[in-house]
Amino acid sequence: MFQFTSRLSWSDVRDISKEFQSPLQTLVPHIYSEMEGIAEGAELDIFDIMALNCRSEIALGRFSDGCTALSWKRSNSAQVLSQNWDWTATVKKNLAMDPWIEFPQMPSTIIPKALWLIKSIVALIQAGIVGKIGFNSAGVGTCLNAIRAKPMISSKLPIHVALRLCLESTSVDSAVKTLESLGGVASAQHILISDSTKSLGLELSPVGNKYLAEDTSGLIAHSNHFLENHYVEEPPWLPGSPIRLDRIKYLALELIAKGVSGDAITPGLLRERIFSDTYNAPQAICGKEDESRHISTRSSSLFNIVMDLNSEAPSAEVVFGRVGSGEEGPVLKMPWV
């Protein structure tokens, strides 16, 4: 995929990843140590693992993943955070539902003091990557929309490391404070982050950020183009992105107009009425492979996740595959213990 999208061999990619080593060691030593542990356990070189975690930055966002995300305020103490995650089907075998981190509740020279308040993180990841889509025991959850834009600045945080830092936070506000205090992110991407009381769309870039608040209906929706961040150079990328964004807003507002609110906002309803939608296929909310594209860039919806971020017992339902297609997998629960 690197070869096709960026004309980079794996050796080239590993060499570029070395630019991130010193910033990671300095800014997030506990996460860098975890990457070393992953490399050792997988019997790979640290630069293999760093390349995976910096893939979005190395390719300058030129991967053809198209994801559609939605947050919906259920009440003053619960948010629903959800998305279809799209990418090439060849990575299906590398997806994992990870119970992943159980933080020791004691002082440590490696683990930052702020993490003593976080008991655990559960997430959907690709093997070898330290952060992505999921939630923690404090009820903070994350979704991701890839953005194709320049510039990229390797002295800043890779986006998957930024996602991990969000999942190490106790609130939306503390996550934003952490990212800003560490100097921001290395590439332009969108993180939709929620806790039990608040959602925020983080249109992040190495040259400036914009933050999107909930609208009057308690919604934030996003796809694969920036809405307010004009600091970056963002060439046209996925023509279906604006259509998906308008469509997910329309479908959510249609449900609101019919009186759907509170506990009626269920994972099953969102899968049936929003995330199975095939309008403007193949670049639909429920994405389908476009066989006219090279196999390494044929995106389709690989999983759907709906998180219930209440302050007492955050949870999620996950379905692998294209929901509503008849070929999707069973409903899986997170956490599962």
Image (cartoon, rainbow, N blue to C red):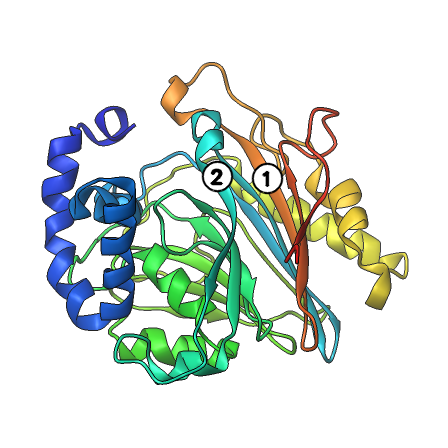
Instruction: Say if mark 2 contacts mark 1, CB within 8 Å.
Output: yes
Q: Name which of mark 2 and mark 1 comes first in the sequence.
A: 2
Farthest residue, direction top:
292
At horizontal 49% and vertical 82% (from top left) the residue drawn is 117
Residue 303, numbered circle? 1
Q: Residues within 10 Å of mark 2 (few under 14, many from 20)?
A: some
Q: Is residue 307 visible?
A: no
* Amino acid type indicated by mark 2: Leu
Quarter holding the N terminus is top left
Q: Is residue 25 above or below residue 282?
A: below
Q: Is residue 70 above or below residue 110?
A: above
Q: Is residue 59 above or below residue 225?
A: above
Q: Secondary structure at mark 1?
A: strand
The front one of 334 and 286 is 334
Q: Is residue 180 above or below residue 147?
A: below
Q: Quadrant of residue 111?
A: bottom left
For disc 2, the marked residue is 95
Left or right of 235 on screen, residue 116 = right
